[in-house]
Amino acid sequence: MSAIPDTAVPRQRPAADPVPAGLDDAAGALRPPEPRRGALRSAAARFGPALGLYGAVKLIGFAVFMMLLESSGKYRGQSPRFGGGAHPWDVVGSWDGWWYRQIAERGYDPKLVPDPGGFFPIHQDSSAFFPLYPGLVRLVSDTTGLGLYGAGMLVSVVSSFVAAAGIYAVAAHLGGNRVGVIAAAVWGAFPGAGVEWAVYTESLFVALAAWTCYFTITRQWSQAALVAFVAGLSRPTSMTLIAGVALAAAVALYRRRDGVAGPLTAILLPPLSFLGYIGWVGWRMGHLDGYLTLQRYGWLHFFDWGAYTTKAVSNILIGETAYLFPYPTEDLVAVLVLFALPCLLVPFLSRRPPLVLVVYTLGTLVLALGSQQMFGTLSRFVVPVFPLTIPVALALRRLNPVSLATVLGVAGAASGWYAGYVIFELGIP
């Protein structure tokens, strides 16, 4: 304990009297213990540059997005459910955001209701959306009084910074600090990045996925198992993350290098959340495959081995629209994303990354490209594939600060159009 100045000691108490721990020597104000203060300084020093650069890129992109919305004014004539609202920022709470707010307000009532005269054979039902994000939105809304829209935005924005920190941790572990900082910023300008600051689940899921991968890579099996378990409640594509963790844990078991309990927990625990929600929906619907039936006939979303993607791309390349849900501008951006994937995948895989990243990346892309869905949403479905930021960061790491700031600034501004305005207003996110 440090000595106490005579001037700070009341006269009625001898100078030798001890001062209670945690009180400021001079003013008596509460202060955090030194270890905690040191931990905060260490975390700020470690993650601060990545979070600052990510935030700058996102602010630029979001500002451009709002400016484009205000300039066009289309949102004023559209339904608040379908890309409209009273203000530009209302747009990021529409589309799937409307469904998440409905779940947060009313909960679930899983049903399979035929709709013979409608476009979809079965009425769309909110149980297609996993419960973690709307549950957090409801919790934050009840706690803060922000309302469901404000709570949804708060959850997404905070989660986006947690995700950026996780991306930094993974990329820095593999390529060094500078690569980690750049990778976090690149994710902020990714195709589809407009949903990172919207009432959507991508930021929350990527936060969980990135930290799950980091814990798996660093062989912290209990933490990886717990975070992957939570991720299993966030979205159906969490199955690829869960599979990546399980395979990496199985290899650890085979090599007998981390004991048995940790890797075994990482294999057995994470699937329970994912399968539990799917099973609950099926039980409530009275059909074991109720969730898959709803996705196929209520949302026209199912795995078709790439038949729909092939048809859409072949049409787009020759200027035709003879495929389901054509949105010309959004679909053109998606084609460019498709062409960019091999250019990122090959350099990424050539570095022989950890197994969990390989399984998660390839599995997510196979599900996105091999399923029937709106083709233009490919831009959004690659947002969770954060490992693809690593080859971009490796290519940019040699730039001097001015050149790097120019590249990221222009990318951030452009993302306000291709990752925000295009998918929310010229397509469907």
Image: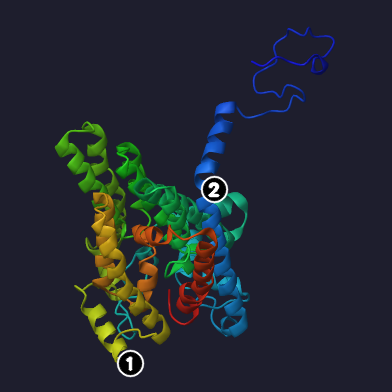
Residue 310 screen position, x and y as percent: 23, 80
The image shows residue 295, relative to residue 42, as above or below, that is: below
Residue at (50%, 46%) from the top-left corner?
47
Q: Give the quarter of the figure containing the C terminus.
A: bottom left
Residue 140 screen position, x and y as percent: 55, 52
Q: Answer yes or no: is residue 228 visible.
A: yes
Q: Is the C-beta separation of discs 2 and 1 under 8 Å?
A: no
Which residue does the numbered mark 2 point to in the structure image?
48
Q: Earlier in the sequence, mark 2 or mark 1?
A: 2
Give the label on residue 161, or none. none
Q: Quadrant of residue 428?
A: bottom left
Disc 2 residue type?
Gly
Residue at (22%, 60%) from the top-left corner?
288
Q: Quadrant of residue 339?
A: bottom left
Question: Which residue is nearer to you in this view: 415 or 150?
Answer: 415
Q: Which residue is the extreme one toward the left?
A: 254
Label 1 crowding class (10 Å Cα cut-off): few <14, some 14-19, many 20+?
Answer: few
Residue at (35%, 60%) from the top-left corner?
391
Give the label on residue 319, or none. 1
Q: Quadrant of residue 80?
A: bottom right
* C-alpha span from label 2 to label 1: 46 Å
Residue 239 screen position, x and y as percent: 27, 56
